[in-house]
Amino acid sequence: MLRLVVTFLFLFFVAILPLHAWLNTTPDALHLTNSAKGLHGITWSGTVRSDGRLSVRIDYDLDQQSHKIDVRMPDGARFAAVNGTPIAADIGRYGEATVTGPASVTYELPGAVTRYRDGAVLSLGDVRNGSIRGDQAMFPCALCYLGNVEYGDIVVSGALFVDGIGAFVGDQASAGLSFVNLSPTRAKADDDDVRFVGLLQAGDEPMMLATLPAKAVTKLTAKDGSVVDAVKAAKQRLGTDGHPFRSPTAAHHGSATVALVITVLYALLLIVILVPVLWARGARSAAQHAGAPDSAITVSSMKPGELSPALAGSVAGPSGGQRQSLVAAAILDLVCRNVISITGSDSRRFTIHVPATATGTTRFDRAVIEQLRSPMHPHEDNDIHVPPLWSVRGPTVARVLSKALAQEARHQRLIRATVPPVIAMPIPIAMGVIAIVGNHGASKLGYTTAIVGALLAFAASRANGMTLTTRGRAEQQRWQQYGAWLRSNNALSTAAAPDVATWGETLAYAAALGAASEVANELSPRLGS
């Protein structure tokens, strides 16, 4: 169960990145909760001239009813017109016009742009006592002066053009936009302008604050100070009264190509992870089923190969509920090869003699000998009087020897990691790197996936453990057949460790394959080890 929990946690975590990549390829949606009746939308457009003058056009998408428009101008505005017809208007009074259908209000506004040494600032909004003076906003009270229009939310779209510069200076957008009372907003820089769209709620008067390159207003005299300080001061004045600035979402949205590549890598990750995990799970279930009833296995009285007893028992798997011990098998195998010796007549009392010169041919043999040596005198001959053999050290010995046996089985290419970390770990790293590069270094989720995803991949690899290789599966079938024949011999089940002098290596294989339960009890650090 743990292996499945860790695996699916890992896959779920990494799946967030491709999902986010696809969602990031489309702009944020604007939802009207209370549409204004009679006014379908507003389009604002402005052009900044080299001398700092701002030309403004506001298009009101009105229905086909007759509407009276009372146009109120910001301070200093001039050349006001409605649908191309000039009107006389000044602050404190209104220029009146009656229209049927859409209406366009145009005017010119000097003084809205301030130039500094490091750039310029366009400010459409007069901040007094912590609030916006409505007359100086992008358009004062969008609904107040429009007859037959009810209050409600309105979609505002717009574009800002910097005369002679275009939307880009080098590879940077020439205008950086911020808004008050216009949210959520998004923007996109085209070849000639910076376009934006946002949601205006009923009764709000939106303000725009835009930063421009200094070369956009070369004919405007530079003042002391900097763009950074001016913007900071403007935001601070409004922020104290709860009017937050909202910058549009980045002009660069996520690339569909990046999202597709990340998705393909995730699909590859699913194959790399789930296929071996599910296959190994099925193989373990099949091995347990095959090992349970002896009648289901073709028996063979011939030892099928030269695998050591411990390795043979490890690939053969569970022995249908019979007690087996790979450690006991290794001890008896060492006795058969005259590396160590057992003296005694029965299981009630016998002695294991471990010479100081004893060594094994495999790392597992050497690990078993190391555990049999006296901790106080590891370089001297050691006699162990059994029982007991391991006593309270049993669980520790079992863990150490299980790890050594797994290393030996991997060295013999009998088992491998079910989910190799060398394959699983690079994929989330690659996904994260692609997300980072594709978003110009701005993908926090990409960094998180690359680091945390790699760690979770390692954890999933460890949790899923080992599975048999092709060679291991071939050996498994042969040794299961041999184990079935050994378990049919009742004399082996009652044989004691000293009986290895009579049975030889057969007893060692019997201990490994679940046919010598008495020996397994005597020599195992714990049942099944």
Image: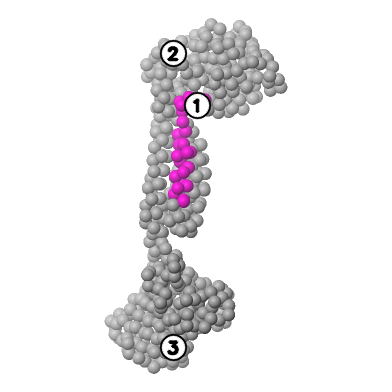
Q: Is residue 345 visible?
A: yes
Question: Of the residues under marks 3 and 1, which one precedes in the sequence?
Answer: 3
> Hey, what amino acid is under mark 3?
Ala
x and y, in percent, of residue 159 in the image? 39, 74
Q: State how far apart marks 1 and 2 are (Cα).
A: 22 Å
Q: Position of residue 505 (x, y in %)?
A: 51, 11
Q: Secondary structure at mark 1?
A: helix
User: Which numbered disc flags the more N-terminal residue, 3 or 2?
Assistant: 3
Task: Provide the residue designation for mark 2.
Answer: 303
Residue 4: percent from left, percent from top: 46, 39
Quadrant hosting residue 267: top left
Which residue shows up at 41% across the image and 39% down it? 272
Q: Report the mark closest to the observer, 1 or 2.
A: 1
Q: Secondary structure at mark 2?
A: loop
- Residue 369 lies left or right of residue 25; in this view the side is right
Name the residue tied to disc 1: 411
Magenta highlight on residue 410? yes
The secondary structure that most of the magenta stretch takes on is helix
Span of residues in magenta: 408-433
